[in-house]
């Protein structure tokens, strides 16, 4: 196999189609915009129909190649319907950014089975179902870039993160297996682990004390922005990232690497 040179095509996505789940808000929406800006046709997938359709109309008026498809990632039937809609478009799928997820901050002893099952069904089971069905569409084309969404909560213990941390730790383990099983088909699988990022999900999860503790332990002394995660995500989609596979990539201002921080 020839080694890739410095061909500019290795750093652009012209002619490629990307699916972004959780694409109507937060990190997903920032990623949708960024992928479109570097030439990709983007299928924005989200459970929020009203917002998805509203954004779709907005992007259409801006002449962007972004469309919306509804999907509930915790439902196998909904994911199979998504797959059928994509097949009917007769397009190859080169990129999957599976970012759909929900959060919960609740102490272990107060976490109900319903809490647990809801988080696991969306974050972990959803990751399994979505990557399985979209990988099936990539395999015949012998090419793909899959980026899954974990969290620093999947790498480190934290108060109130029993269900959430377990779901995100599971995404890491699942993604490592996928990176092995899909590599014969020239499909790479990498995992992002954002830390404290200013999104609606984090606003709902992080109370005043959580924010104080995070800021105390982030060397950069601030929360990140969705655009910063999107920029990292983009790198893993590029043709030139072909030898990066099975990695777990924190985007957290140094939180995961830090120890004692003195003032």
Image (spheres, rainbow, N blue to C red):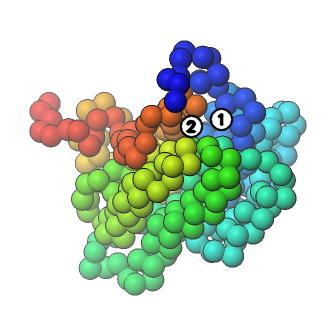
Task: Pick whichever of labels 1 and 2 is earlier in the sequence.
Answer: 1
The residue at which mark 1 appears reads as 35
Circle 1: element type: helix
Residue 172 position within the rendered picture, expressed as x and y whole percent measured from the top left: 38, 56
Looking at the image, residue 47 sits to the left or right of residue 240; the answer is right
Name the quadrant of the C terminus: top left
97 or 14, which is in the foreground?
A: 14
77 or 62, which is in the foreground?
A: 77
For residue 184, above or below residue 226: below
178 or 194, which is in the foreground?
A: 178
Category of crowding for the residue at label 1, using alpha-carbon neighbours closer than 10 angstroms: few (below 14), some (14–19), many (at least 20): many
Category of crowding for the residue at label 2, using alpha-carbon neighbours closer than 10 angstroms: few (below 14), some (14–19), many (at least 20): many
- For the point 26% across and 59% down, the residue is 158
Residue farthest to the bottom, as pictured: 113
Looking at the image, residue 33 sits to the left or right of residue 192; the answer is right
Circle 2: element type: helix
- For the point 75% across and 33% down, the residue is 15
Residue 35 position within the rendered picture, expressed as x and y whole percent measured from the top left: 65, 35
* Separation of marks 1 and 2 at Cα, in angstroms: 9 Å
Residue 246 position within the rendered picture, expressed as x and y whole percent measured from the top left: 40, 46
Residue 19 visible within the image: no
Labelled disc at residue 122: none
Residue 115 position within the rendered picture, expressed as x and y whole percent measured from the top left: 43, 78
212 or 100, which is in the foreground?
A: 100
Q: Are marks 1 and 2 in contact (CB under 8 Å)?
A: yes
The residue at which mark 2 appears reads as 237
């Amino acid at each position: 196999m020839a080694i890739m040179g410095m061909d500019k095509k290795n750093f652009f996505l012209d002619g490629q189609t990307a699916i972004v789940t959780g694409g109507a808000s937060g990190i997903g929406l920032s990623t949708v915009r960024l992928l479109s800006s570097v030439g990709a046709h983007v299928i924005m997938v989200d459970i929020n129909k009203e917002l998805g359709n509203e954004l779709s109309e907005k992007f259409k008026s801006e002449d962007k190649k972004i469309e919306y498809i509804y999907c509930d990632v915790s439902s196998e039937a909904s994911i199979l319907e998504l797959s059928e809609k994509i097949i009917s478009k007769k397009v190859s799928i080169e990129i999957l950014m599976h970012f759909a997820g929900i959060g919960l901050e609740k102490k272990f002893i107060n976490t109900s089975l319903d809490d647990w099952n809801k988080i696991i069904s969306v974050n972990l089971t959803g990751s399994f179902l979505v990557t399985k069905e979209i990988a099936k569409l990539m395999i015949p084309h012998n090419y793909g870039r899959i980026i899954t969404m974990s969290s620093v909560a999947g790498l480190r213990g934290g108060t109130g993160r029993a269900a959430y941390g377990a779901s995100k730790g599971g995404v890491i383990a699942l993604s490592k297996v996928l990176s092995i099983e899909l590599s014969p088909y020239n499909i790479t699988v990498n995992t992002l682990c954002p830390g404290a990022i200013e999104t609606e999900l984090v606003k709902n999860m992080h109370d005043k004390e959580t924010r104080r503790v995070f800021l105390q332990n982030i060397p950069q002394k601030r929360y990140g922005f969705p655009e910063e995660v999107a920029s990292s995500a983009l790198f893993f989609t590029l043709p030139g990232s072909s030898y990066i596979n099975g990695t777990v990539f924190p985007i957290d201002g140094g939180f995961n690497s830090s120890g004692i921080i003195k003032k």
